[in-house]
Amino acid sequence: MARRTVTCTINGSKREYSVDVRSSLSDMLRGQGGLDSIKHGCDVGECGACTVLIDGQPFNSCIYLAIWAEGKTILTLEGLTDKKGAISDIQQAFIDEGAVQCGFCTPGFIMASVPIITREEPASRDEIRKQVAGNLCRCTGYDKIINAIEKTQHKRIEEKKQK
C-alpha cells in the first residue's frame, strides 16, 4: 500500500495527513480529520452528501482523491461556524425554512449553495436549482431548500448594500 503526505488548508487551518494514495478526500476528511459533516452516501459522486468546497468550488469529496488536495484550500460545513461555534446564516435559514428533515443531505446542500450566497448579484431560482442539482434529498422536497438559499442570498446582498 503506497502512502503519501498531503498538506492542505482545511477550514482555515493548515493540516497534514498521511494517506493511502487510493483514499478519497471524504475518507481523509471524515476519518483522519474527524469532520462529521462529510457524509458517505453513494460513494460514486451521485448524491452530493459529501460536497465540500475546494478552492471555492463545490466537489463531491467521495470521488476526489485525497492526494489531489495537496496545496488546496478546503471548506466544510464545520468551517462555516464562527469562532464561538455559532451556526452561519445559511444553516439558520435551512432551519427556519424547514429545509432539514433527516439532515443527511443538509451539509452537502449547504456547501453547494455557498457559491450562490456569496455572489454579488442574486441568482434566480432556476440558477439555484442548477447549482444544487448534484445533491439529492429524499425527505424535504426541494422547495424548502431553494427557499433557504434564496432567502440567504437576498439577506446577504441587502446587508452589503447597507454597508
Image (spheres, rainbow, N blue to C red):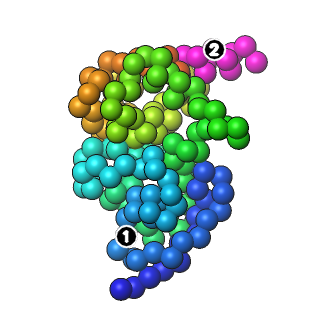
Q: Main secondary structure of the magenta part?
A: helix
Q: Residue at x 45, y 58 (%)?
A: 30
Visible residue check, residue 149? no
Relative to 136, does residue 100 appear above or below in the rendering? above
**In the displayed structure, does residue 147 sit left or right of residue 138?**
right
Viewer-proximal residue among 121 and 136: 136
Q: Residue at x 63, y 14 (%)?
A: 158
Q: Residue at x 39, y 85 (%)?
A: 2
**In the displayed structure, does residue 90 sit left or right of residue 104?**
right
In terms of sequence position, does the residue under pointer 1 or pointer 2 come before the other?
Answer: 1
For disc 1, the marked residue is 23
What kind of residue is marked 1? Ser
Coordinates of residue 50 in the picture (x, y in percent): 38, 49
Relative to 18, does residue 153 appear above or below in the rendering? above
**In the displayed structure, does residue 42 sit left or right of residue 153?**
left
What kind of residue is marked 2? Glu
Q: Is residue 159 magenta?
A: yes
Q: Is residue 13 magenta?
A: no
Visible residue check, residue 22? yes
Viewer-proximal residue among 60 and 125: 60
Viewer-proximal residue among 157 and 65: 65
